[in-house]
Image (cartoon, rainbow, N blue to C red):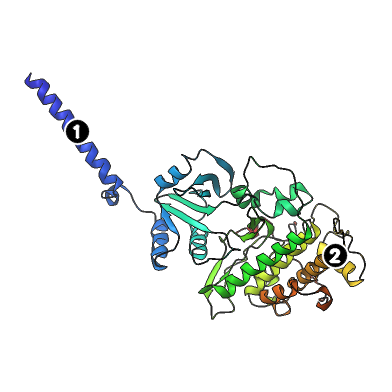
């Protein structure tokens, strides 16, 4: 009888000790003894504290797991990690991007959290929360049911399937939605162009700090249920004081085909908000042509560079030769977008308009716009004799 009582006491004592240990680990009391903190973790926590209280909510990993219903509804997967559909406690549907532990040193994560948490604009994606819990990193965004702009403008379906651009495309596109290509009319495309310009102007002039995006492209423009555009993916963004008009960056950043010349060669001038204007112009021309500006799968001797092709037609005041232009009103919108795009991709930053001027041009009459000089340089395209595509997705 005594032995049974002793055994029961020992078992009870062991259970109590185990429960205490579990509680201690959950409250991180013993972490310094059993868990060696990663230097990157310490740096990220320091940066988050340095920027003071953020307007963006911080969630624990358990909360992220709960809002995604244990990661049940997976929207897709890419090099960055995986994206899941979730729901906040107030019922709002969200897209939860779970970042891969092995990817990067946390710079893109910090850029995203710090830059977007400073913004509040109808044309900027809302970061509703983030998770930085030990090795777990996650970003929680508002859900965009219409996905990214690229799927509405490229005639070639393969043009929007590049693995490099998988992130935002899968992040907001409901896998149960129709996969048929839907073409937007020119009025909607024009409104989208104006909305993106308004978002960029806000980043440069409306925030307490100036934010340069450095990766403006159709894949990073999300569309809500009313096709209102939202600028997304601030992983390469640069935050700088408003009084600084020029910035210093280490190495090229962005996506080939959209990178301003001065970003990869300072001989063209200083890096500034005009670098985003260049990317914006390349994107606008892709919206006009409904194709990639640079086609690398055909002979270089043919007219594969769309800006040169469309410029020659615009200069001769002939028919632009574009499909789905049904009347004079649409033709005026298309010509206006084309002229604006060509001004934006001028090689020297000083020749490009400011984003405020871009908005003014898009809202004016086409007869008042002057045709710009012919652009002679494009961002490097993938070729054996040039920098690789991947080298610009830093």
Residue 205 placement (x, y as % from top left): 58, 75
Q: Which quadrant of the figure has residue 327?
A: bottom right
Q: CA distance from mark 1 to mark 2?
A: 80 Å
Q: Would you identify the image quadrant in which residue 264 lies?
A: bottom right
Which residue is depicted at the point 53% across and 66% down?
A: 120
Above or below, 301 against 76 in this view is: below
Q: Nearer the viewer, residue 337 or 391?
A: 337
In the picture, the quarter occupied by the N terminus is top left
Task: Identify the residue at the far top of this view.
Answer: 1
Secondary element at tag 1: helix
353 displayed left or right of 332:
left
Residue at image mark 1: 14
Left or right: 319 in relation to 186:
right
In this rendering, does residue 138 appear at all? yes
Foreground mark, 1 or 2? 2
Residue of label 2: 331
Instruction: Using the image, determine if residue 25 lies above or below residue 280.
Output: above
Mark 1 and 2 residues: CB-CB less than 8 Å, in contact?
A: no
Which residue corresponds to the image point at 43% horizontal and 57% vertical from the top-left? Answer: 57
Badge 1 crowding class, 10 Å Cα cut-off, few under 14, some 14 to 19, many 20 or more, is: few
User: Tag 2's secondary structure?
Assistant: helix
Few, some or many C-alpha atoms within 10 Å of disc 2 (few <14, some 14-19, many ≥20)?
Answer: some
Image quarter of the C terminus: bottom right
Q: Which of 68/145 is in front?
A: 145
Q: Quadrant of residue 266?
A: bottom right
Above-or-below relation of 357 to 37:
below
Q: Position of residue 277 (x, y in %)?
A: 68, 71
Residue nearest the viewer, comparing 268 with 153: 153
């Amino acid at each position: 009888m005594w032995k049974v009582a002793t055994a029961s006491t020992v078992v009870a004592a062991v259970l109590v000790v185990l429960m205490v240990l579990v509680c201690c680990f959950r409250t991180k009391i013993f972490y310094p003894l059993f868990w060696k903190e990663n230097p990157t973790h310490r740096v990220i926590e320091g940066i988050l504290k340095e920027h003071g209280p953020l307007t963006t909510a911080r969630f624990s990993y358990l909360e992220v797991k709960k809002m995604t219903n244990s990661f049940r509804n997976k929207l897709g997967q890419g090099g960055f990690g995986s994206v899941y559909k979730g729901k906040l406690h107030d019922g709002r549907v969200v897209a939860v991007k779970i970042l891969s532990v092995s990817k990067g040193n946390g710079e893109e994560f910090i850029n995203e959290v710090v830059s977007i948490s400073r913004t509040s604009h109808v044309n900027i994606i809302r970061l509703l929360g983030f998770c930085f819990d030990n090795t777990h990193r996650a970003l929680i965004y508002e859900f965009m049911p219409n996905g990214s702009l690229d799927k509405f403008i490229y005639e070639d379906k393969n043009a929007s399937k590049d693995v490099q651009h998988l992130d935002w495309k899968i992040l907001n596109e409901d896998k149960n939605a129709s996969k048929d290509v839907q073409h937007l009319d020119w009025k909607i495309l024009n409104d989208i162009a104006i909305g993106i310009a308004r978002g960029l102007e806000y980043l440069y002039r409306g925030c307490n700090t100036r934010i340069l995006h450095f990766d403006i492209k159709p894949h990073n423009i999300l569309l809500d249920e009313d096709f209102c555009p939202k600028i997304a993916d601030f992983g390469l963004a640069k935050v700088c004081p408003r009084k600084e008009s020029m910035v210093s960056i280490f190495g090229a950043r962005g996506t080939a085909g959209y990178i301003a010349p001065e970003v990869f060669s300072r001989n063209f001038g200083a890096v500034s908000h005009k670098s985003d204007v260049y990317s914006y112009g390349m994107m606008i021309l892709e919206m006009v042509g409904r194709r990639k500006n640079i086609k690398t799968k055909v002979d270089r001797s043919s007219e594969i560079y769309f800006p040169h092709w469309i410029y020659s037609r615009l200069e001769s005041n002939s028919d632009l030769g574009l499909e789905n232009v049904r009347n004079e009103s649409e033709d005026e919108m298309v010509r206006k977008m084309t002229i604006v795009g060509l001004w934006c991709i001028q090689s020297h930053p000083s020749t490009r308009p400011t984003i405020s001027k871009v908005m003014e041009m898009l809202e004016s009459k086409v007869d008042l716009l002057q045709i710009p000089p012919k652009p002679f340089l494009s961002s490097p395209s993938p070729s054996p004799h040039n920098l690789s595509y991947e080298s610009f997705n830093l």
